[in-house]
Image (cartoon, helix red, strand yellow):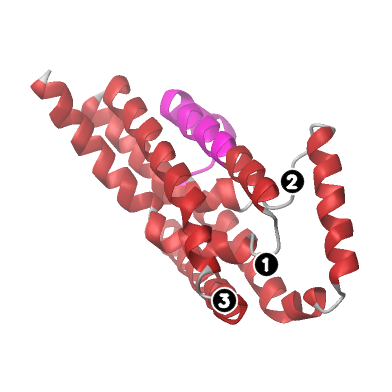
Amino acid sequence: MPAFLDALVAAFLPLFVAINIPGILPLYIGMTETLDRRSRQSLLVRALTAAFVLAVLMLFAGEVIFRTLGITVNDLRVGGGLILLTIAITDLAFGDLKKRRGGKDLKRSQQAMAESEGDGGEPELSVVPLGIPLIIGPGAITTILIAEGQYGYPPTLLSIVLNMLLVFVVFTFGPALMRFAGPSTSKAVAKVASLFLAAIAVAMIRAGITGILAG
């Protein structure tokens, strides 16, 4: 048992750093600032489900999938970075324009999201980019593959479960703290989060290209 706990801690900590909960929490708050509590919680559950499924899939079949498709983690970094960069630029350039459409459009969009949930559809932003690649991205996938090789399947799988639970707890109570700061602060956090999202995207693309050239 002590050996298993040591392996669990050794697998948990690198994945916790790779997911970077404090870093992506402001991004999550910025993306969901216009949603009510029920819609935000539903989006979070779907995002975590997608992230967990991808993490487990990479744990048990990641190397086989990569070899079959002929791709590498660096290719994943570039692709994920391009997706994040597009979303960040769109929010920075057109986010205020969307908000100025008024409360009627906001209610209409939330109603459409609720209908989408009722029909089994995916709410906007739940799977991409929140679940993938923000929660489980190239860094987390690489960490999972390395941890499996060093510590085996049980400690690595349990470390994934614990990290997903931690994300759920922090993301559930994090937005409630922002309500005490007021709408102006929330808007500022959303814009800064979009700027950091763009920076993260550029860093992912740069790391991917550097890895490809080095390889």
Q: Which residue is mark 1?
A: 86
Q: Is residue 16 visible?
A: yes
SS of the residue under disc 2: loop
Q: Which residue is found at the position 36% from the left and 26% from the top?
A: 157
Q: Which residue is found at the position 30% from the left and 37% from the top?
A: 146
What whole-number distance in Å separates the C-alpha atoms at marks 3 and 2? 26 Å
Mark 2 and mark 1 lie on one chain; the one further toward the N terminus is 1
Q: Nearer the viewer, residue 204 or 127?
A: 127
Magenta stretch holds residue 72: yes
Q: Which residue is mark 2?
A: 123
Judge the density around disc 2: few (<14), some (14-19), many (≥20) Cα neighbours within 10 Å. many
Q: Quadrant of the N terminus?
A: top left
Q: Quadrant of residue 10?
A: top left
Amino acid at pointer 2: Pro
Q: Nearer the viewer, residue 166 or 174?
A: 174
Judge the density around disc 3: few (<14), some (14-19), many (≥20) Cα neighbours within 10 Å. few
Amino acid at pointer 3: Gly
Which residues lie in the magenta part? Answer: 48-74
Judge the density around disc 1: few (<14), some (14-19), many (≥20) Cα neighbours within 10 Å. few
SS of the residue under disc 3: loop
Q: Which residue is found at the position 82% from the left and 34% from the top?
A: 118
Magenta stretch holds residue 52: yes
Q: Is residue 75 visible?
A: no
